[in-house]
Amino acid sequence: MQFEQIKGFAFDLDGVIADTARFHGQAWHQVADKVGTPWTRGLADGLKGVSRMDSLEMILKAGGHENDYSQDEKVKLATEKNDNYLKLVATLTPSDILPGMKAFLDELKAAGYSLVLASASKNAPKVLKYLQLADYFEGIVDPASLSHSKPDPEIYVRAAELLQLPADQVAGVEDAQAGIQAINGAGELSVGIGANLHDADVRFDSTADVSLTNIKKQLG
Ligand code: B16
Ligand code: MG
């Protein structure tokens, strides 16, 4: 894929713009304790990019509790988790933007790229507000309107629609394997941040390394 044809960027939020995973993790850990599922690193990592209700199902399944709760009880557990999560994210400030990302967003805006957010989080508008980044994005994909979680490409297909660009003019930025799969499945250029993202078209170890120059360098 030619970088020259890229006109818009779709960003994941958690793990790319801010580390909200630690707050999701803290809040889900409480739910896991409540339902009696052992909290492990593998379980926590597997929840990245997964929707709220699908995350709850994964936690219940990991402890063999998938048939122990009614739909109403599940909604109650997910609501409790979200209330706790919202208290935690309300402490975010611009100093919590991950290293280098403010500079990268500024660089993209200055170069005339359009930006949208492709986060599975229904709380993304609030998080962007706390980080004082809301004005950078022309649109936010509404996760409530999606039928499938990442790795399904749906969220990145919708991001391209919001950008009003064909897929091959869009780059997606993700920190999770499921997100990279979603970008690739949508036919967009995938920029991965973190280890083990072998399917990413371009990959960086840290958010601090992401820049237009470094992306172009990797694409040769
Ligand atoms: P909410 P991302 C995802 O955000 C998180 O990685 C995932 O852990 C969370 O369950 C999901 O959002 C839904 O979040 O409960 O706030 O709607 O990585 O897609 O930006
Ligand atoms: Mg993420």
Image (cartoon, grey):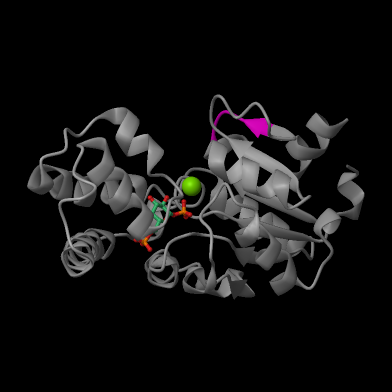
In the rendering, at what x and y percent does residue 132 appear?
Answer: 45, 68
Direction from residue 190 to residue 123 in the image, left or right:
left
In the rendering, at what x and y percent does residue 44 appear?
Answer: 31, 38
In the displayed structure, would residue 176 be above or below residue 119?
Answer: above
Direction from residue 182 to residue 194 in the image, left or right:
left
In the rendering, at what x and y percent does residue 217 appear?
Answer: 81, 32
Direction from residue 132 to residue 59 in the image, left or right:
left
In the rendering, at what x and y percent does residue 133 appear?
Answer: 50, 67
- Residue at 53% in and 65% down: 147
Work out which residue is located at the far front of the displayed protein and give it: 67
Direction from residue 160 to residue 123 in the image, left or right:
left
- Residue at 40% in and 59% down: 94
| Residue 148 lies in the magenta-colored region | no
**Can you tell me which quadrant of the image ligand 1 is in?**
bottom left
Q: Which image quadrant is residue 6 in?
A: bottom right
Q: In which quarter of the image is the N terminus?
A: top right
In the displayed structure, would residue 20 be above or below residue 76?
Answer: above
In depth, the one of 9 and 83 nearer the eye is 83
In depth, the one of 200 and 15 nearer the eye is 200
Q: Which image quadrant is residue 62 in?
A: top left
In the displayed structure, would residue 61 be above or below residue 139?
Answer: above
Quick check: can you spot residue 211? no
State how many labels appear. 0
Q: In which quarter of the image is the C terminus?
A: top right
- Residue at 38% in and 71% down: 126
- Residue at 53% in and 74% down: 145
Q: Give the range drawn in magenta.
A: 203-207
Quick check: can you spot residue 53? yes
In depth, the one of 214 and 122 nearer the eye is 122
| Residue 206 lies in the magenta-colored region | yes
